[in-house]
Image (cartoon, helix red, strand yellow):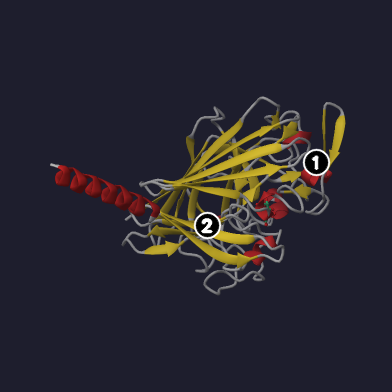
């Protein structure tokens, strides 16, 4: 009897260990080396049962690699990135990174809360862009793996009161979860100890043919938005919410990205150098809804975007200029990737008619965005 008990105990310990081992096989951790600052950069690769892999660095919470199957089941890496962590300090591209404290532009790098003016670093023409000189894309996040069949990562970062000019200590948490249905959900939460502004997003560039496989002009996209925000020359919204109907910004039904991107008769296309604008969804209910769908016809890869956010910056990589070399050694030329940066409206801290981006002490900022991959045969 005693022997049987011992044997049963041994088997149960072994099977526990074995389950644990299997689960942790869904998250691989690798060292990417040390930065000039001395910080060590770690890469966490999540893998689901279907075989999709998403690799994320503690530096910037950056998505470095993301594989998706084509119509024949062949996987390709569909996101732009670099193998060298130091490359991610190039603050002109923000490849794959988390963006904060405020995604997109704030005019002249200034805003006021309750009569107190705050001044941010100017890093984009006369304006402030994507959180400043050292935004959330350039800081080291604390990472906790979330083991399981649907693996994930919890990233946390404490942004100090006054960091990059923003008021209040901001406690930020970002959870990436890779689901069995080939979707990645990103949930952003934040709290503050002083009234501040927050607008968090991710700046992944996609090319559904595969990273480094040319431009994205042949992708087809639809966006469930009947309005967009025209801008001035510095890409600051003018305040107008313009109907997309009859313009190159109408993606209510699907269009090839390249079809109208060089329409030099359209002032907004000219100012953006292509698409680099904020689309406003008809549904601003703050619930998770499908907002965009992309198809790359040759591979059959599709990507659907769901978000709780009221808007998306659709950016077609107009500033990629061949200077950055990607993971497979190919240089990223103009329009080699596109971004769908779900967010609140740019310059909201200065535009009272836009939905507020103010966060108060005691409140919790929470948004979710899901990128789901599929195939069309
Ligand atoms: C955002 C902006 C673009 C550009 C990229 C980074 O998408 O809207 O204008 O600055 O980031 O290159």
| Residue at 41% across, 58% down | 68
Q: Which residue was labeled with disc 1?
A: 162
Q: Is mark 1 on a helix, strand or loop?
A: loop
Q: Residue 222 carries which label?
A: none
Residue sitting nearer the eye, 267 or 82: 82
| Residue at 42% across, 64% down | 76
Q: In this view, does 252 lie to the left or right of 75?
A: right
Residue sitting nearer the eye, 42 or 217: 42
Q: In this view, does 356 lie to the left or right of 11?
A: right
Of marks 2 and 1, which one's residue comes earlier in the chain? 1
Quarter assignment of residue 337: bottom right
Q: Is mark 2 on a helix, strand or loop?
A: loop
**Any part of residue 369 in sight:** yes
| Residue at 65% across, 26% down | 363
Q: Name the residue at the left extreme.
A: 1
Quarter assignment of residue 91: bottom right
> Label 2, label 1: how many angstroms apart (C-alpha)?
33 Å
Quarter of the rendering occupied by the N terminus: top left
Q: Residue 206 carries which label?
A: 2
Q: Name the residue at the front extreme.
A: 2
Q: Is mark 1 within 8 Å of ligand 1?
A: no
Q: Which x, y percent locates residue 173?
A: 59, 40
């Amino acid at each position: 009897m005693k022997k049987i008990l011992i044997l049963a105990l041994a088997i149960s310990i072994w099977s526990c260990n074995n389950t644990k081992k299997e689960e942790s096989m869904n998250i691989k951790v690798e060292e990417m080396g040390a930065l000039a600052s001395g910080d060590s950069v770690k890469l966490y690769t999540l893998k689901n049962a279907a075989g999709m892999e998403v690799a994320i660095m503690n530096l910037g919470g950056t998505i470095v690699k993301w594989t998706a199957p084509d119509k024949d089941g062949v996987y390709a890496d569909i996101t732009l990135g670099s193998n060298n962590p130091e490359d991610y300090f190039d603050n002109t591209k923000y490849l794959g990174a988390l963006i904060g404290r405020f995604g997109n532009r704030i005019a002249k790098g200034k805003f006021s809360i309750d009569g107190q003016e705050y001044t941010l670093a100017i890093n984009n023409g006369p304006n402030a862009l994507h959180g400043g000189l050292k935004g959330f894309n350039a800081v080291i996040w604390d990472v906790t793996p979330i083991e399981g069949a649907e693996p994930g990562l919890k990233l946390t970062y404490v942004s100090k009161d006054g960091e990059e000019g923003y008021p209040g200590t901001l406690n930020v948490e970002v959870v990436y979860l890779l689901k069995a249905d080939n979707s990645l959900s990103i949930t952003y939460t934040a709290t503050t100890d002083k009234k501040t502004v927050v607008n968090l997003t991710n700046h992944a560039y996609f090319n559904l043919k595969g990273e480094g496989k040319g431009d994205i002009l042949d992708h087809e996209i639809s966006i469930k938005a009947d309005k967009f925000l025209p801008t001035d020359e510095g890409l600051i919204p003018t305040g107008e919410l313009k109907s997309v109907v009859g313009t190159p910004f109408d993606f209510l039904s699907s269009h090839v990205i390249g079809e109208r991107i060089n329409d030099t008769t359209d002032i907004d296309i000219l100012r953006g150098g292509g698409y680099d604008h904020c689309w406003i969804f008809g549904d601003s209910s703050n619930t998770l809804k499908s907002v965009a769908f992309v198809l790359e016809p040759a591979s059959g890869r599709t990507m659907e975007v769901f978000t709780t956010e009221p808007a998306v910056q659709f950016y077609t990589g107009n500033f990629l200029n061949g200077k950055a070399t990607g993971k497979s050694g190919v240089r990223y030329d103009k329009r080699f990737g596109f971004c769908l940066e779900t967010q609140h409206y740019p310059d909201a801290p200065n535009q009272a008619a836009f939905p507020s981006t103010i966060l108060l002490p005691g409140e919790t900022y929470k948004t979710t965005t899901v990128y789901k991959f599929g195939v069309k045969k």
